[in-house]
Amino acid sequence: MTTPPAYRGRIAPSPTGFLHRGHAATFHAAHERARAAKGTLVFRIEDLDPQRSRAVYAQAALEDLRAAGIFWQEGPDVGGPFAPYVQSQRKNFYLAAWKKLRDGGFIYPCARSRKDVQNATQAPHAEDDAEPIFPTQWRVDTAEALKHETPAGVNWRFKVPNGETIKFNDALQGEQAFEAGKDFGDFLVWRRDDVPAYELAVVVDDAAMRITEVVRGADLLKSTARQLLLYRALGLQPPGFFHCPLVLDEHGKRLSKRAGATLLNPARVG
């Protein structure tokens, strides 16, 4: 009988603002699940947004989570075997994944902007904040990808297998199923400003850091379906998933980093 791998979880804040109580609730759940499993918790800084990421927010996250009693065993302030733990310093890892996807015919260059997709007649009138479905007639032959030595200068999209239902069992939310081409369409893996997209970066990092369970907010359930397609295309073993309920404000809306009253440390405001 094969022994399951030791538990490895992660907390991965984006330093685009100070942490709020919703982040703390999710990170506390990650901390508790790792501790209950006598496993390892990894702290990773997801700072791929060059316009909004700030070092002051990353440092504040370290301090505020420590003060809240949330601790980790690997990360930028304690070291470990998978340094660096800062995404902006890991571009070579993402480039290697981009090349593998390009060579495998899974992605294609795309000149269409987000506004183009939003204005497309095929875009669904969703009741939530889901992105519109990318029109299939705008797809580019994946053979065009081989003409590009680097991803810079154009957007890159993953060609989803339309009609395939992506299923997974979430440890908290239960069985989940999303249909490619209906619930989500061809999605970005690299931006024209030469920045890897969230979907690609987290897959590469979670695989490299041997994460066995991803604990995050329930707003990312659909992202899990996209990421499972990337795991498959890259030949990587996906982790398990545990999606926490979102913490809402008094109006029933998701908490925002700009809402000072909901910050994990309100003294950070101003």
Image (cartoon, helix red, strand yellow):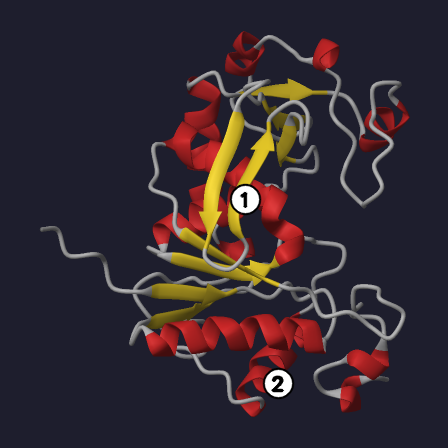
| Position of residue 259 in the picture relative to residue 243 (left or right) | right
- How far across and down, in percent of the image, does residue 80 sit? 32, 70
Q: Secondary structure at mark 2?
A: helix
Q: Quadrant of residue 55?
A: bottom right
Residue name at image x 64 percent, y 33 percent? 188
Residue 19 shows up from this direction: no
Measured from the top left, where is residue 20 in percent x and y?
A: 72, 76
**Quadrant of the rendered structure where residue 52 is?**
bottom right
Name which residue lies at 54% across and 64% down: 12
Residue 176 visible somewhere in the drawing: yes
Q: Tag 1: residue type?
A: Thr
- The numbered mark, 2 or 1, whose residue comes first in the sequence reads 2
Quarter that holds the C terminus = bottom right
Q: Residue at x 85, y 24 (%)?
A: 116
Q: Which residue is mark 1?
A: 224
Q: Nearer the viewer, residue 145 or 264?
A: 264
- At a point 74% along the width and 23% down the height, the residue shown is 134
Q: Which residue is denoted by mark 2 in the rendering?
A: 64
In the rendered structure, the answer to whether residue 65 lies left or right of residue 259 reads left
Q: Nearer the viewer, residue 152 or 158?
A: 158
The x, y position of residue 92, in whole percent, is 45, 43
Q: CA distance from mark 2 to mark 1?
A: 28 Å
Of circles 2 and 1, the one toward us is 1
Residue 93 lies, with reference to residue 113, above or below; the image says: below
* Label 1 secondary element: helix
Please, is residue 224 above or below residue 15 in the view? Answer: above
